[in-house]
Image (cartoon, helix red, strand yellow):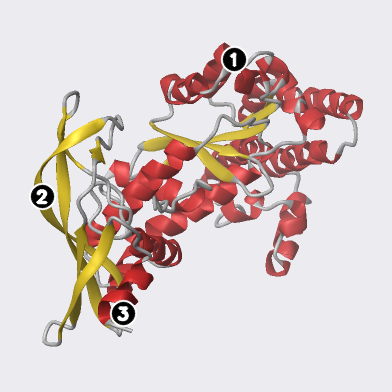
Amino acid sequence: MQDTQLYQQILGLVAPWRVTGVTMKYAERTIEVAVACDEQVWGCPTCGKRAHLHDYETRRWRHLDSCQFKTILVAAVPRVKCEEHGTVTVKVPWAEKHSRFTAFFERLAIDVLLDCSIKGACGLLGISWDEAAGIKERAVKRGLARRKAEPMPRLCVDEKSFGRGHDYVTVVVQANAKATVTHIADGRTTESLNGFWRSLTPEQLAGVEAVSMDMWEPYLLSTQAHVPGAADKITHDPFHLVTHLNAAVNEVRLAEHRVLMEMGDDRLKGSKQLWLYGYENIPERWDKRLTELKAQKLKTSKAWMLKEYFRDLFACQTLAEAQAFFRSWYDWAIRCQLKPIQKVARMFQRHRDRILNYFIHHLTNGAAEGINNKIQSLIKKAYGYRNRERFKADIFFHCGGLDLYPAFSQ
C-alpha cells in the first residue's frame, strides 16, 4: 500500500478530498500530508447556495501523531464567492472552522485536558498553553450550543470566590445523579441569578420543583420574581443555617472570654475550635476538655447546646414534627438572653417556612458543595486564575456535563 493510500484511510477522506503526497522530515520529526481537492460545484458554507470558486487558501492542521512523528495536514482550501455572504472559505471535513487542529486531535486533547493540569497536558500533547486554552474554549462553546431545553426540577444556587476579598461568581447546579453546572455569572447579585432564570423557557420554569440556597436576599428576590410558586419551592441549606449559629456561638465565646480574662480566668483560651464541632465529631483528645467546660455553666456552653439542639431539627421524620421542634427551639433561643443567638433565631423565624420546606423536598446544597470542591481543585491545579472568563470556561469544561467533542462532518 502506498503512503498516500495509507493516509487516505487514516484520515478517512472521501471525494472530493484526496491525499496527494506524504513527506517525512526526519530532522524536524514531522510528517506532512498534502491534501488536495478535485474540481466540483461548490456551495456557500453559510447558506448552502451555489457559489463561484474565487481562489485557494493554503492552511495547516495538527493531526494525531503517526510513526511517533508530529503529523501535519496541508491543504489548499477553496474560497468561494457568495452573493449574500461575500468571499468565504469552504468547510473541510476533518476540522472545525478557525481550528488549527483536526477533529481527531481535538478529541484526544479534550480527553487529556479533562484528566491533567493544563501544564501537564501541554507537555504530553506538544502544544502551547494558548493552544490548549483555545481547545477548551471551543469545546465549551460547542457544548453550550448543544444543550437542549430540558427540565431542571432540582437546583442548587451558591457562590464561589474568584479571587481575594469579596469577589464572587454565582453558580447554579443541577442536583441530578451526577451534579452538573448549568449557569455561571459574575458577582452574587439579583442580576447574577436573573440571567439564569431568563434563559429558561416557561415550561422549564414551571418544571422547577425545588431550589436550595442560603438566605442571601438577592438570590431569594430573583427566584421569587421568576419561578412560579417559589415560596413553596425554596429550601434553605442546613449547612449554611448551622454556619450562622456557629458564628453566633463564637461571638458569645469572645465576649465571655474577655470578661473572664479581666478576672484572670483563661479557661476559654484556645477553645474556639472546640465549640465549632458537632457533638458526634468531637475528637477523642478534646472530649474531656469540652465535657469539663460544658459542666461549668458557661454562656458559651449554653450557646453551643442551642446550636446542637437546632441540628437535631433535621432528624425529624415529618413536616408536622419539624414544625413542633422548630417552635420548641425558637422559644428556648429567644429566652436564652444571649443576643447573638437571639439575633440568629429571629432571622430563622423570618425564613421559617423556607427552612421547613426541607421536609417536603429533602434538597440541600450538597451537590453545589461537591462542585465547589471540584472548582477548588481546578484553582489549585491552575495556581489561581487571573482571567475570569477562563475561570468560568474551566468550570463548564470540567463540571458542566457538556458534549465537548467536535463532530465529524464527512
- The answer to whether residue 348 shows anywhere in this view is yes
Judge the density around disc 1: few (<14), some (14-19), many (≥20) Cα neighbours within 10 Å.
some
The reply to whether callout 2 and callout 3 are in contact (CB within 8 Å) is no
Disc 2 residue type (three-letter): Tyr
Of the pair 285 and 406, the residue shown nearer to us: 406
The reply to whether callout 2 and callout 1 are in contact (CB within 8 Å) is no
Q: Residue at the location (69% across, 48% down)? A: 177
Mark 3 vs mark 1, CA separation in Å: 57 Å
Question: Quadrant location of residue 381?
Answer: bottom left
Q: Position of residue 357 (x, y in %)?
A: 76, 26
Q: Is residue 241 left or right of residue 192?
A: right
Disc 1 residue type (three-letter): Gln
Work out whether 247 lies above or below 189.
below
Judge the density around disc 2: few (<14), some (14-19), many (≥20) Cα neighbours within 10 Å.
some
Work out whether 55 lies above or below 85.
below
Q: Is residue 295 left or right of residue 182?
A: right
- Residue linked to disc 3: 66
Question: Mark 2, mark 1: which one is toward the viewer?
Answer: 2
Q: Residue furthest bottom?
A: 26
Question: Mark 2, mark 3: which one is toward the viewer?
Answer: 2
- Residue linked to disc 1: 224
Of the pair 171 and 307, the residue shown nearer to us: 171
Question: Quadrant location of residue 14?
Answer: bottom left
- Report the disc number at residue 331: none
Q: Position of residue 353 (x, y in %)?
A: 74, 19
Mark 2 vs mark 1, CA separation in Å: 57 Å
- Nearest to N terminus: mark 3 or mark 1: 3
Mark 2 vs mark 3, CA separation in Å: 27 Å
Q: Residue at the location (66% across, 17% down)? A: 230
Q: Is residue 80 left or right of residue 140?
A: left
Q: Residue furthest left?
A: 55
- Residue linked to disc 2: 56
